[in-house]
Amino acid sequence: MKNIEALRNKRDDIINCEVKDSSGLNDFQKTPNDMPIMIPKVGIERFRIPLNFEHADGTIMSHDSHASMFVLIESHKTGANMSRFCKILQEQSATDPVNHNFFKTILRRYRTELRDYEDEPLIPESYLNLSFSYPVKQPSLKSGNWGWQYYDCEWEGIEGKDDKPLMQLTLKYEYSSTCPCSLSMAKQYEEEYRAGKTTEGSGIASAHSQRSIATVTTTYSPDSDFHIEKLIELLRIALPTETQSLVKRIDEQAFAILNGDNPMFVEHASRRISHVLNEVEDILDWEAKIEHVESLHSHNAVAYIRKEKK
């Protein structure tokens, strides 16, 4: 009997909600919270939406995106209005391209418009993360052609109580890495073959090289001039053997020469990135994972590195 009575009470609580929305429907999200525990991030992930991005040259291009949107929920609050995240993003993207100002506007709207009541203080923290594939024109090395190079990106904005948003940009950069040890042994063998010291093989040896990936996350202020193309430019300086989009034979030969000029272990690649990124004042912090997908081994060589704290 006690169980039946408890079920009836629970049913009555659900039916007889004291808070109603503008249409008269029960609004449990605004009811008092009986378990006072703060939740750092509440919201939505994997909201799919096409967004217009402003590229560094001023062109506007549409890219399919996945949006993750969050706010901090204080201990006395029950929850967040989930549909409002999506509505705000759709409204803003209908008129504005994605750039730093877009992030700043959205973050402030989340803190303002996801409040239960207009006379409440702003929500303490808000987050917007966009995942997308970003195309940039890449010139061929020698032939005068070009192709589209795509970069998997995550772009996140965060705003807190200090009202000073921060941006985080994560980008995957693919390049070729030639093993210095393997290159040295290949050249040593070729010289010994020409000198008649060995008759093994055909006199030609190939150093092992592989497609490699640097996943780099930078933190910076949205008031700076830092942008996606700038990070790509920096990584091309650090790791000039970027994989190519469109090549003719003359480009392929140039790529082979470029790899021969830049042999690198995963340790070399990580230090090259560090040397370049540490010189950029706009970058407040950074971290990177560098992965060489070995063609010699069945395992990968990996390094993690981040900005050293002074």
Image (cartoon, rainbow, N blue to C red):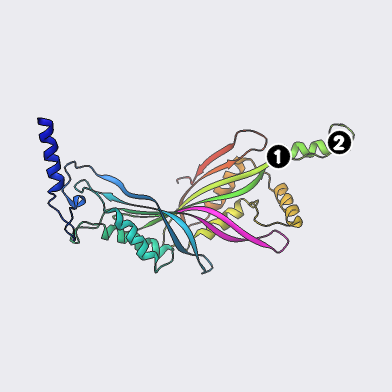
- Look at the image and say whether residue 147 sits in the magenta stretch: yes
Element marked by disc 2: helix
- Give the dominant element type of the magenta stretch: helix, strand or loop: strand
In the rendered structure, the answer to whether residue 291 lies left or right of residue 23 reads right
- Residue, disc 2: 193
Residue found 73% across the figure and 40% down from its top: 207
Q: Position of residue 110 (x, y in %)?
A: 30, 58
Residue found 69% across the figure and 63% down from its top: 145
Viewer-proximal residue among 87 and 123: 87
Viewer-proximal residue among 214 and 308: 214
**61 shown above or below 207:** below
Identity, as a three-letter code, of the amino acid under mark 2 = Tyr
In the rendered structure, the answer to whether residue 275 lies left or right of residue 76 reads right
In the rendered structure, the answer to whether residue 149 lies left or right of residue 107 reads right
Identity, as a three-letter code, of the amino acid under mark 1 = His
In the rendered structure, the answer to whether residue 274 lies left or right of residue 260 reads left
Q: Is residue 126 visible?
A: yes
Task: Please identify the quarter of the rendering in which residue 299 is found.
Answer: top right
Question: Seen from this angle, which residue lies furthest right?
Answer: 196
Q: Which residues are magenta?
A: 132-154
- Disc 1 versus disc 2: nearer the observer: 1
Q: Position of residue 254 (x, y in %)?
A: 74, 54
- Look at the image and say whether residue 136 sits in the magenta stretch: yes
**81 shown above or below 306:** below
Question: Seen from this angle, which residue lies furthest top?
Answer: 1
Q: Earlier in the sequence, mark 1 or mark 2?
A: 2
Pointer 2 local density, CA inside 10 Å: few below 14, some 14–19, many at least 20: some
- Residue, disc 1: 208
Q: Quadrant of the N terminus?
A: top left
Residue found 57% across the figure and 41% down from its top: 291
Q: Position of residue 112 (x, y in %)?
A: 26, 60
